[in-house]
Image (spheres, grey):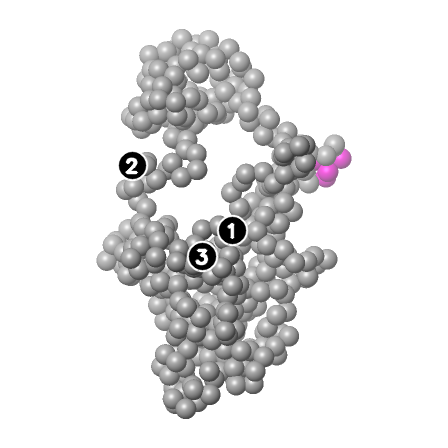
Amino acid sequence: MSRVPLLEGVRVLEVALLAPDSLGMHLVDLGADVIKIEEPPVGDYVRSVGAVSVDGVSALHRRWNRGKRSVALDLRDDAGRQAFEDLVTVSDVVVEGLRPGALARRGLGYDRLRELNARIVMVSLSGFGQNGPYRDLPSHGVAYDAYAGLAPPTAGPDGFPAIPPHVSVGMHAAPLFAAFGTVAAVLHARATGSGTHLDVAQADAAAWWNAALLEQDALQEQLGEAAGPTATAASGRLAESVRYQYYKTADGRYVLFMATEAKFWRRFCTAVGRDDLYERHPPRRPSDHDTGNRELRSELAELFATRTQREWVSLFLSADVPGAPVYVGAEVRTDPHFRARAHWLDPAVHGMPLLASPLLAVDASELAGDPPAAPTVGQHTAEVLRDVLGYPPDRIERLF
């Protein structure tokens, strides 16, 4: 059990490709009925994109489109467009996860949708947004993190610049922003009878993730000071931190030690029987990383090498000292806390193990069942047109 049916009764029409599909996934996980409108015969080509596939179907499709119903409609065709408009009249949300203006070019922009349903919420989730110089710049994936300064060039083979290993931010964060914006807009529409057109850009989300550095740079400009530090320089200062730092443990793994506050530094020193460390290296301020204190760093390195990662985490818990285990890649799967909280969707249903939403309800009785597998193109066309719109069989047949 993983889904929280808070959006039960909310119907969403999704016209999207690739990463914007995950907006609908988040809404499905909250209990919404997400109807994925796909152009026949190929549909969303995310099914063939990505490094991992099972039985010829991409893991990205299996993850992002799980739980949705697929309706195959050609929105360039009068009959397909009419069926889409009919669905708009009985829906709450239309997701446009395409290039800006894609639905408007099919005569289905927000003005037309609002004529059909005054309460409709349209969410346009794109790369660089609905306006600005880069509005029509084709892009995906790492482009937004590169734009936001989150993926600076590193030295690659033969001295060529290379994309660094990094966790993608923009393509995942933007759908989350869009999801809670969608929920807020639906609440507003139900309270006022008036819909909203939301504009969410993956590039904006990535830049927001780097807000601390951007704000610092803007403040320095405001004060007339030199330009702020680069991300590399900021990372360099963090590398010199001592009481906010990675340390290698006896089993060859690592922990993150975070005793920057005076009270936590004292607790740690007492817990390990090394009050002398506190006396010789007292805090200089309420929160102190002891940056550049190489003597203390060497002593701590020797100390952390005396216990295993699990033993240090146990000490952090018992002594109430901030810290965490450090993992590389998928190692967190072996962690007892991860195993206690993570929920995996049934591989027999989805064709592979998929992590369920991390959004949980404290009361398990409030959870809905797991979502069904990602659909094939048009799998639910007849079902939706019959059950939602009441189309007779002959009219449905004319759409195929």
Measure the C-alpha gap from mark 1 to mark 2: 27 Å
Quick check: can you spot residue 191?
no
**What residue is shown with label 1?**
173
- First in residue order: circle 2 vs circle 3: 3
* First reached walking from the N terminus: tag 3 or tag 1: 3
Q: Residue at x 68, y 61 (%)?
A: 136
Tell me the element at label 2. helix
Q: Amino acid at mark 3?
A: Ser
Q: Residue at x 68, y 40 (%)?
A: 218
Tell me which amino acid carries mark 1.
Answer: Ala
Q: Residues within 10 Å of mark 1 (few under 14, many from 20)?
A: many
Which secondary structure dominates the residues rendered in magenta? helix
The CA distance from mark 3 to mark 1 is 21 Å
Q: Give, as a three-letter code, the residue at label 2.
A: Pro
Measured in 3D between alpha carbons, the distance from the residue under mark 2 to the one under mark 3, in whole angstroms, is: 29 Å
Magenta range? 220-224
Left or right of 185, for residue 305: left
Q: Which residue is mark 2?
A: 336
Of badges 1 and 2, the one in the foreground is 2
Quadrant hosting residue 386: bottom left
Q: Which residue is mark 3?
A: 58
Tell me if residue 92 comes above or below residue 250 in the rendering: below
Q: Secondary structure at mark 3?
A: strand
Where is residue 393 shown, x and y percent of the image? 38, 89
Secondary element at tag 1 = helix
